[in-house]
Amino acid sequence: MAKREALRELQARIAQRMQVASTSDSPQSWLAVECAGHGLLFPLAQAGEIFSVPPLMPVPHTQHWFIGVANLRGGLHGVIDLAAFLGVRGDAEIPREQARLIAINPALEVNGALLVDRLAGLRSPTQLEAAAVGEQRAAPAFVGASWRDSDGRSWQELDLSTLSHDEHFLRIGG
């Protein structure tokens, strides 16, 4: 029970900091998440609300990474297992205890939510340094810069606006 309360408090703090960051004139800030052990950064302006994983309605004949439809605050959202979409999760079970759905900002006009394994807080450019050029590799257009934190952990920026218009992302039919 204490773990759930601590998780709720963390979510509330992140939501509050996201609100402050999105309305301030501060430099780029990111929502940090983990997917299959990979650190990912979503621009705060492109991320929407954070949800616990609700019951999902499976959709037949779709890609393996499109895991269903969820009712999020009265709106239907397609749910994408981000790790599976990126090809970094095999057939491993999704850890549901800490898993969260990150809705794509409604301003991007896509009723979608990304399933991530766990929230890792907020990050700003002052907390990270750009990864060495040798560490950058060819990637889809929605993959942004690579970063490292003070602990040496790698973080990959994902542009949710570009992702939400990516042809592969939009083609959910199996």
Image: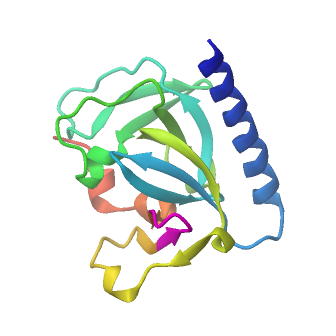
Looking at the image, residue 121 sits to the left or right of residue 157; the answer is: right
- Nearest the viewer among 65 and 150 is 150
Q: Position of residue 39 (x, y in %)?
A: 44, 56
Q: Tell me if residue 76 comes above or below residue 33 in the rendering.
A: above
Total marks in image: 0
Left or right: where does residue 96 sit relative to residue 61? right
Q: Residue at point 64% right, 68% down?
A: 127
| Residue 98 x, y percent position in the rendering | 48, 30
Residue pushed farthest bottom?
133
Say which of 157 and 54 sits in front. 157
Seen from the viewer's position, the closer of residues 48 and 98 is 98
Give above or below for 89 relative to 25: above
**Stretch of the chain drawn in magenta:** 147-153
The answer to which quarter of the image holds residue 72 is top right
Placement of the N terminus among the 4 image quadrants:
top right
Asked if the stretch drawn in magenta spans residue 89, the answer is no
Residue 156 to residue 40: above or below: below
Residue 26 appears left or right of 142 = right
Q: How is the image coloured?
A: rainbow
Name the residue at 54% across, 58% down.
42
Q: Quadrant of residue 123?
A: bottom right
Q: Quadrant of the C terminus?
A: top left
Query: Which residue is pictured at 44% across the width and 73% down the height?
Result: 146
| Residue 55, x across and y down, in percent | 43, 17
Residue 69 placed where, x, y %?
40, 28
**Residue drawn at (21%, 36%), measured in percent from left and top?**
62
In the image, residue 16 sits, relative to residue 31, either above or below, namely: above
